[in-house]
């Protein structure tokens, strides 16, 4: 019996140690990114491009060539040994205006490291890479560290702090390393998932480089066409470590994504940086007659649009109107492109931002009192999560017939 109790106690201690060393760090830093650099503000179309695992003379020059041709800058998280073996590539990165920061000495997942090895690696990597920078005449300090795979144990984080390094994560993973990924697949993935302020992670060495190198010129051309500036982490204005106050918005964003999957809601134009998302639904009622004479009855096919709350909260009302005009053109294209929206008789939204929607051509109708109260509670939950004050406006129904909506916004965006 005593041995059984000892075994149970040892198992409990093992579980507790695992939570402290791996479980907690996984949630706090690897997932929530608390205290790490993750993304900049969404108020401007600027993204930070970052590359891991280099330098490699077989693949890094092609990445540098593409960046130079596009006039773009990036941050390279380099490995200590390749950096020491190829100082000419480090010199070129610095000469062409890129940022060089620390990735690792040993490219090994944090959960597979000894406590001592995980603690020492960030500082050792920064020291060795800093020495290479000085060797080639550079003056840029090494202040950032991105562990391999973006993975953390308690000792990885303690090692960063001991070395006075800031952890650098990302908000958009290129997934260039996936088996079966292609340059066209990478380009399509980034085009769809891109958002203002994103920190994008790609690879200039290793398995991902076989995809990123060939794809990068077209990716950079896409970004320019959509009005994005590509820069390094050091030049991304407003970039700061994630704070506890930022977590409610992160949690709400996760909930939004889960609800979108459940309701087949897609971003307008299939582009995540749209301020609008659209879902096929049934008109909720009550029955009403629109200005053009169409009578909408409860239950007829319709398209409901929702705001990208995170983006709208940062843009403010004036810029929201300007961006929404463009994105309603994407919704118009979706009405004709997405099979599940082709039968929609109306386009509507239930919200407390009716003054904005009236400026955009929508007509407004009162909602049943119970529906209005429920939506106001939810609107205030969202506003508080995204750092805005509670609204006193009553939610209303903003609606246009399909015909009137296409008349206003039927021009397909480029």
Image (cartoon, rainbow, N blue to C red):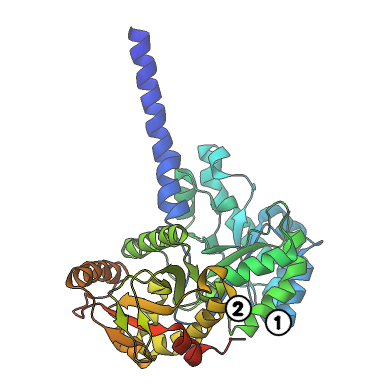
Nearest to the observer: residue 212 or residue 366:
366
Indicate the quadrant where residue 292 lies. Answer: bottom left
| Image position of 393 with respect to 31: above or below | below
Dot 2: element: strand
Task: Work out how far the residue at label 2 is from the one at label 1, CA to CA, in angstroms.
Answer: 9 Å
Residue displayed at 57% across by 38% down: 112
Indicate the quadrant where residue 125 lies. Answer: bottom right
Residue displayed at 45% across by 69% down: 279
Residue 289 shows up from this direction: yes
Q: What residue would you read off at disc 2?
A: 230
Q: Tally the marks.
A: 2
Farthest residue to the top: give it. 1
- Left or right? Give the position of 283 relative to 94: left
Query: Dividing the image into 4 quarters, which one contains the C terminus?
Result: bottom right
| Image position of 225 with respect to 187: above or below | below
Proximity of marks 2 and 1: CB atoms separated by less than 8 Å: yes
Residue 80: percent from left, percent from top: 67, 55
Nearest to the observer: residue 201 or residue 414:
414
Q: Earlier in the sequence, mark 2 or mark 1?
A: 1
């Amino acid at each position: 019996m005593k041995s059984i109790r000892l075994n149970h106690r040892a198992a409990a201690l093992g579980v507790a140690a695992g939570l402290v060393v791996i479980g907690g760090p996984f949630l706090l830093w690897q997932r929530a990114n608390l205290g790490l650099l993750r993304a900049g503000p969404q108020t401007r179309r600027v993204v930070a491009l970052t590359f891991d695992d280099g330098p490699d003379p077989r693949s890094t020059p092609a990445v540098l060539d593409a960046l130079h041709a596009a006039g773009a800058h990036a941050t390279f998280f380099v490995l200590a040994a390749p950096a020491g073996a190829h100082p000419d590539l480090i010199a070129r990165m610095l000469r062409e205006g890129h940022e060089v920061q620390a990735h690792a000495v040993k490219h090994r997942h944090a959960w597979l490291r000894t406590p001592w090895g995980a603690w020492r690696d960030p500082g050792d990597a920064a020291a060795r890479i800093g020495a290479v920078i000085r060797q080639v005449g550079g003056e840029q300090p090494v202040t950032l560290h991105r562990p391999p795979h973006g993975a953390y144990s308690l000792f990885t984080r303690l090692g960063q702090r001991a070395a006075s390094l800031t952890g650098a994560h990302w908000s958009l993973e290129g997934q260039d390393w996936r088996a079966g990924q292609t340059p066209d697949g990478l380009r399509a993935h980034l085009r769809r998932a891109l958002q203002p302020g994103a920190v994008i992670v790609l690879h200039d060495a290793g398995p991902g480089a076989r995809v990123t190198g060939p794809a990068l010129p077209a990716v950079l051309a896409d970004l320019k066409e959509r009005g994005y500036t590509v820069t390094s982490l050091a030049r991304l204005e407003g970039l700061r470590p994630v704070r506890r106050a930022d977590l409610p918005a992160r949690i709400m964003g996760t909930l939004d994504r889960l609800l979108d999957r459940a309701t087949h809601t897609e971003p307008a134009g299939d582009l995540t940086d749209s301020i609008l998302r659209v879902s096929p639904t049934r008109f909720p009622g009550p029955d009403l007659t629109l200005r053009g004479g169409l009578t909408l009855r409860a239950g007829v096919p319709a398209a409901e649009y929702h705001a990208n709350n995170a983006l709208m909260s940062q843009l403010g009302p004036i810029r929201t109107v300007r961006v929404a005009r463009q994105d309603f053109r994407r919704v118009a294209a979706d009405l004709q492109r997405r099979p599940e929206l082709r039968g929609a008789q109306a386009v509507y939204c239930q919200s407390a931002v009716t003054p904005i929607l009236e400026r955009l051509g929508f007509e407004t109708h009162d909602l049943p009192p119970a529906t209005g109260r429920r939506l106001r509670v939810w609107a205030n939950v969202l506003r508080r999560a995204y750092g805005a004050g509670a609204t006193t406006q009553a939610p209303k129904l903003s609606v246009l017939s399909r015909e009137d909506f296409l008349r206003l916004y039927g021009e397909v965006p480029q």
